[in-house]
Amino acid sequence: MHSGRGPRKVVLALEGELTIFRAEELKASLLGKLESCDELDVDLARVTDIDTSGVQVLILAKRTSLLDGKVLRLHGHSQAVINVFELLDIAQLFSDPIVMSSP
């Protein structure tokens, strides 16, 4: 049943750098989309760089989705995202399979 408050499922494609310089923009975008849907699929295929600020925003969005009873999925992980997730050993926080995007 659709609640009428927005689309049930939304896909958000992130691109470029997910770094401290874009953390506020990223946070506003992710949390805003989460407010307006039940499921948010985040495509990371075009992410060229990610630092700990970008990771923190993704973790915040995941925790917010869980607290609100919503679903947030990450997919199409770019090599930059995979490298940082492996370095920080955080892939399990998101419960999503890491599948590289096709070149």
Image (cartoon, grey):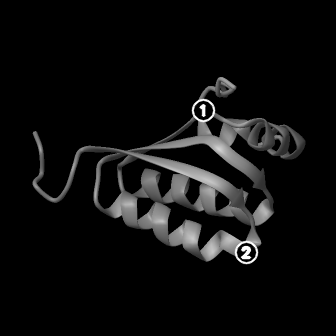
The amino acid type, in three-letter code, at marker 1 is Gly
Label located before the other in sequence (1 or 2): 2
Type of the residue with mark 2 = Phe
Q: Residues within 10 Å of mark 2 (few under 14, many from 20)?
A: few
Which quarter of the figure is the C terminus placed in? top right
Q: Nearer the viewer, residue 94 or 31?
A: 31
Check disc 2 and report the residue beneath it. 21
Above-or-below relation of 45 to 60: above
Picture coordinates of residue 71, whole percent (x, y): 40, 43
Q: Where is residue 34, by image quadrant? A: bottom left
Label 2 element class: helix
* Residue located at (72% from left, 59% from top): 17
Pick whichever, 52 or 29, lies toward us. Answer: 29
Which label was assigned to residue 76?
1
User: In the image, is residue 33 above or below residue 27?
Assistant: above
* Residue pictured at 60% horizontal, 76% vertical: 24
At a point 69% along the width and 60% down the height, the residue shown is 18
